Image (cartoon, grey):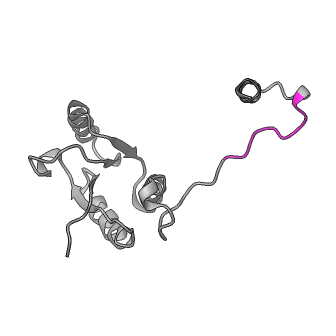
Amino acid sequence: MSSPAWRMVLAAPDGALLQTLVDHLRPILAQAPHAPELLAVQTPEQLPPNMGPTPVFLMADGPPAALDLWRTWLHQREWPYQVVYGSGAKGQTQLAHALAADERFKGLPGLLARSETPPRWLGACERCADPACEHRLFSQLRAG
């Protein structure tokens, strides 16, 4: 078996939540064309000492002090990370949304891509008065 092309870290101070997420996630990630090695840890000290910057998905369901420790550790090392909120089924759903946003996981069953938000206004532009809409319109006109 060849080694994975890349790694990702799932971090959760709550060990029970971490195990639940790992059990749910491993079979999904195994279907990826270039599946990552998933490292599931509760504290930064559990990571291999010589490991370089690796994407981290930090589950925010835990004691504030543990989350602060993770954030400080990640900022000091300039590692990319994403905080995922929710526990139980909500945590699984939020993690699935976060992973679905990564191009390497596009189209994997079990991950939930969010649908695009429809524009707020679909009427005639002269009556819109939406600053964001006007900015987009004039930016497009200037770009030609």
Left or right? Give the position of 135 relative to 111. Answer: right
Q: Quadrant of residue 92?
A: bottom left
Residue 132 in the image, given as x and y percentages of width and height: 71, 27
Left or right? Give the position of 124 relative to 39. Answer: right
Count of labels in the image: 0
Residue 99 in the image, given as x and y percentages of width and height: 43, 56
Residue 112 in the image, given as x and y percentages of width and height: 52, 61
Tell me what residue is drawn at x 35 percent, y 73 percent: 27
The quadrant of the image that shows the N terminus is: bottom left
The quadrant of the image that shows the C terminus is: top right
Would you place residue 121 above or below residue 33 in this image? above
Q: Quadrant of residue 81?
A: top left
Magenta residue span: 117-125
Q: Residue furthest front?
A: 144
Would you place residue 35 above or below residue 55 in this image? below
Tell me what residue is drawn at x 48 percent, y 52 percent: 101
Q: Is residue 121 magenta?
A: yes
Tell me what residue is drawn at x 26 percent, y 60 percent: 5
Residue 113 in the image, given as x and y percentages of width and height: 55, 58
Q: Residue furthest bottom?
A: 1
